[in-house]
Every structure is written in structure tokens, then in C-alpha cells.
Amino acid sequence: MILVNLIPYRDKQQEQRKQIFLASIFGVVLFSALCWYMVYGVFVHKTAHEQLKVNYLQGVVKQLDNKTAAVAQLFKKKNELISREAVITGLQDKRSLAVQIFNAFTSVTPAEMYLNKLTQNGSVIVLSGYAESNSVIAAFMRNIKSDKIFAKPTLIIISDAHVGGFNVKSFTLQVKLVNLHDTVNGKK
């Protein structure tokens, strides 16, 4: 029998198989790296796209915040103008009130009496003056009560006084104005 030495052939085959194995491992690693790079690229692209959306939405939100601030500023100005208008309207309504008060006092004050002081605090008027007698003061109070501008005349103090050589009665009287708004607008 012939003996053939197959060791070099087997070594060569084993070396070829080893090279094929290493090449296939290299190919798998290369293919895996390529797949990983592609997946990474897709995620980076999606992340960049989402970041663009977020940036756009942040810009829109900033614009809306600016517009909301402008609208709030307009509402504030509107409320200030409305309050100014109310003040001006109130002043215009009360413009003729002083004239009406003095006209009313001249019509209800008896001839035997004169007033020397008149002060107003809100809807309360305090009068001071002199009269010939208590009955003149009582008539004055009745006249005030019957007038449409005044209500609730209250005598605070009455005393004897000597003015210009005459004995008179000194008095202080408190009167309330009827609803100022109605009085000014001619109602009641």
C-alpha cells in the first residue's frame, strides 16, 4: 500500500477554513457596524427633525406670549380709560350740584335768618347761622324737609347769641343730600 502524506493537505485546508471563518467573522462585524451606523443615522435624523419641531413650537409659543402680553396691556389700558371715564362722568354729573344746593338753600331759607357757614362732607351738609327765634329755625327745618334735594334735617346745637346789638339764636344744623346721582340728573 502506498502511504501518502496528507498532513500538508489537511493543514492547507484547515488554513483555508480558518481564513474563510475569519473573513466571515469580519464580514459579520462589518455588516453589524454598518447596520448600527444606519440605525444611529436614522435616530440622529429623527432627533434633529424633532428638535426642529420643538424650536418652531418654542418660537410660536414666544410669539403667542408676546401677543398675550400685548392683549393684557390693552385690557389694562381699557380698564384705566373706563375708570377715567367714570371719574369724568361723575364730575360732570356733579358739576351743577353746588348750584342746585345754593339755589335750594336760597328758596328754603326764611328772611329772618342768615347762614354764615356751610360745609359739605360727602352727602352730609353742616350749616351754621343765626335766626330771630326758635320758630324761624323750625320753619327752616320744615322747608328743608319738604325740598326734593335734602332729607333728614337734624338740629345739632341751638344757643342764644348777641349779634350787632340784637339777641338772636345761633344754630348748627346737619342735612343729608338725597341720592346724589338722582339729584344731579334731575330725577325724583
Image (cartoon, rainbow, N blue to C red):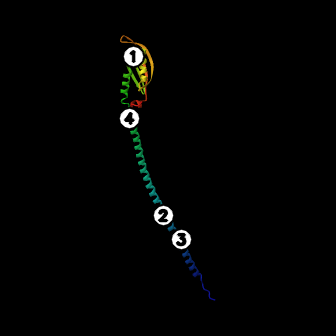
Answer with the quarter of the image where residue 110 lies: top left
Q: Is residue 101 above or below residue 70?
A: above
Disc on the earlier residue, 3 or 2: 3
Which residue shows up at 42% across the image and 22% down it? Answer: 144
Quarter of the figure with the N terminus? bottom right
Q: Residue at x 51, y 70 (%)?
A: 31
From the image, tell me which residue sits under label 3.
28
Circle 3/circle 2 CB separation < 8 Å:
no
Q: Residue at x 42, y 17 (%)?
A: 137
- What residue lies at 58% left-to-right and 80% top-to-bottom? 10
* Disc 1 and disc 4 in contact, CB within 8 angstroms: no
Query: Does 83 sit above or below residue 148?
Result: below
**Residue 89 tag number:** 4
Chain-order first, disc 4 or disc 3: 3
Q: Which residue is mark 1?
A: 130
Q: In 3D space, how far apart are the residues under numbered discs 1 and 4 (Cα atoms)?
A: 37 Å
- Mark 1: few/some/many CA within 10 Å (<14, 14-19, 20+): many
> Is 161 on the left-hand or right-hand side of 22?
left
Residue at which label 2 appears: 42
Cα–Cα gap, marks 3 and 2: 21 Å
Marks 4 and 2 close (CB-CB < 8 Å): no
Dot 2 surroundings within 10 Å: few (below 14), some, or many (20 or more)?
Answer: few
x, y percent for residue 24: 54, 73
The answer for how far apart the CA atoms under marks 1 and 2 are is 103 Å
- Disc 4 secondary structure class: helix
Horizontal placement of 38 versus 6: left or right?
A: left
Marks 4 and 3 close (CB-CB < 8 Å)? no
Q: Nearer the viewer, residue 110 or 47?
A: 110
**Picture coordinates of residue 23, whole percent (x, y):** 53, 74
